DNA sequence: ACCACTATGTAAATCTTTTACAAAAATGGA
DNA sequence: TCCATTTTTGTAAAAGATTTACATAGTGGT
């Protein structure tokens, strides 16, 4: 995803004085730039219109209009998410920066998604006898539990196993028709790999949601590849959880569509029980 | 968030023949519209330029340029996320639709965020003696576990309690300086409310991450309000988990910044142990 | 079939952006 | 420090895009 603001960051050193003024304006009020004509922008920056055109060209845009489009695409909703300075300590900037990361992760995941693998995975899960989600460590175990939470509602027999020893034990009980959904951010959780090998030995199908070309994906019948940079600020949270969650949502939705009325009926029952237990006219979504 | 494509959906019935052609073009190739001039668009649609202008006006835009900006903002990266037809069964459309929901949820959450409450919450958590995360049901229990996973790494004493009886028992052991982070999508989890009352009785501070003006928020010292529509397709996953996760990320980041070097050192240790246990040059993020 | 109304297109007018060129500022070497 | 050269910036004219005004075609009702 090439975005104009990272281009700006790159070429900033070789900008001239007037161009720097424009760069600052872009950072501070991208929204204004998106909505104003070149004359207004020039006036506000105290430079001439051609300087603005040249600035756009330097940023790799054909024309001022093309430049505006790029900026518009990046500012989404009038706010400056992607402008967010990742090193600022201002809470608003931190929030914007996190939002930018979230969005970038989601968009990138969707763009890189191997839809064939996803559809195949959904079909396999929909036809499975037992779905066992394996995931250990922060993100993966969270997603593993989420998989269980999501699929049992559709009427599928689902278990989430986050402990390596238990994964191995569960694997030993699997049969053809059973499916293991292997979750690993790094793709090299070697203990999980052992469990997957066992699962395959006993005829279970392995679907991996992991980084491609790593041990875990090698062991899978179907790999849904996720390849995300984690960012290098150790204080910052990892964005991969959003990617995993998104794919989980997608799988659950596709499986639900496959199952059709059966799934709908199960969801209705779960919701009915929940509503009864709490509040007769609780219109909330399933779960809390 | 007013977006041009939902406006289109709204006014579609009252569009004329030529305008419908333009509407179809917008849906099928928004990217082209963003990059082309009015003449090209007119030519491709087989209508005259003024018709295009009129079409833009009908969609509530001042000018063709303004219209293009709106489209650009919504298409972000050349893809048609917000165009995604929510009722289509095509996997690509489902994925786009989910992504659109995710993005909308994230942006809306960020826009509506009461930053004062967030900063206050972060300060309170950073200075806490014990942090107890309470959450039950699908989303909330996931987030509760995630809170624990996130904050223990910063060196905070953190527990996640998803069982109502245990919440009440834990509450009875709390003291001033302890903090309860109450997570509830609906805001009317009455059993959690009991636990929160108990926690307050014993002097703990209650921070609620929930829908505003509901029982849970009334019981909180600090409420971070989240108010999201859940969508009405029962097969579709709820978007609130993204909102909750985003706020959790934000809180964790702000707390980490508050704690400064202490937090960094703890993260380094966690990472070091993990790396050692797995792979000497494992550069992955913390956890898997 | 005619009238009134709406929808659409043509051509001129207006406004925006770009190009070409010239002036000013900055750079660097003697 | 000064001059020559290069780079940056601005002015004004040209090119291009969009909009307005008006005319024509189409549509539905009587």
Image: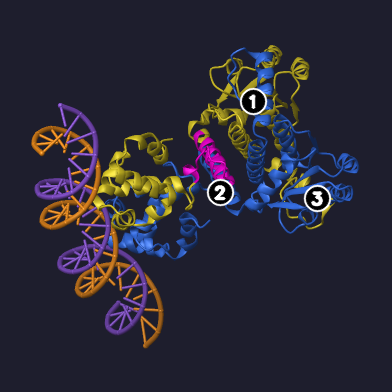
Chain colours: A blue, B yellow, C orange, D purple
Query: Residue B119: horizontal and vertical position, in percent?
Result: 56, 31
- Camera-near label (2 vs 1) is 1
Residue under label 2: A107
Residue under label 1: A286
Q: Residue A189, labelled with which disc?
A: 3
Mark with earlier residue (3, 1): 3
Q: Is B160 situated left or right of A89 in this image?
A: right
Q: Chain of mark 2?
A: A
Callout 1 secondary element: loop
Query: Residue A121: horizontal and vertical position, in percent?
Result: 71, 46
Query: Residue B270: horizontal and vertical position, in percent?
Result: 77, 44
Seen at 61% across and 17% down, the residue is B188
Callout 3 secondary element: loop
The verdict on a common chain for dots 2 and 3 is: yes
| Residue B245: quadrant of the picture | top right
Asked if residue A247 shows in the view, the reply is yes
Query: Residue A223: horizontal and vertical position, in percent?
Result: 72, 52
Image height check: is A70 above or below A261? below
Callout 2 secondary element: helix
Image height check: is A118 above or below B141? below
Mark with earlier residue (2, 1): 2
Magenta region? B81-108
């Amino acid at each position: 995803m090439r975005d104009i603001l990272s281009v700006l960051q790159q070429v900033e050193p070789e900008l001239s004085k007037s161009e720097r003024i424009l760069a600052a304006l872009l950072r501070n009020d991208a929204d204004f730039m998106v909505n104003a004509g070149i004359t207004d922008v020039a006036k506000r920056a105290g430079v001439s219109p051609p300087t603005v055109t040249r600035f756009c060209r330097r940023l790799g845009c054909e024309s001022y209009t093309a430049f505006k489009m790029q900026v518009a695409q990046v500012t989404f909703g009038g706010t400056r998410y992607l402008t967010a300075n990742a090193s600022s300590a201002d809470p608003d900037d931190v929030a914007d920066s996190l939002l930018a990361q979230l969005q970038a992760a989601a968009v990138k995941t969707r763009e890189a998604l191997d839809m064939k693998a996803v559809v195949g995975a959904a079909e396999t899960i929909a036809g499975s006898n037992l779905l066992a989600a394996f995931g250990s460590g922060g993100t993966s175990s969270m997603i593993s539990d989420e998989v269980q939470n999501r699929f049992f509602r559709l009427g599928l027999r689902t278990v989430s196993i986050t402990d390596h020893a238990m994964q191995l034990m569960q694997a030993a009980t699997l049969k053809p028709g059973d499916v293991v959904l292997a979750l690993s951010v790094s793709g090299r959780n070697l203990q999980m790999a052992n469990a997957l090998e066992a699962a395959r030995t006993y005829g279970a199908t392995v679907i991996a949601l992991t980084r491609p070309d790593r041990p875990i994906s090698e062991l899978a019948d179907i790999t849904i590849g996720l390849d995300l940079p984690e960012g290098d600020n150790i204080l910052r949270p990892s964005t991969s959880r959003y990617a995993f969650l998104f794919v989980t949502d997608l799988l659950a939705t596709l499986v639900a569509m496959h199952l059709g009325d059966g799934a709908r009926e199960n969801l209705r029952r779960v919701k009915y029980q929940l509503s009864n237990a709490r509040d007769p006219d609780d219109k909330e979504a399933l779960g809390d």
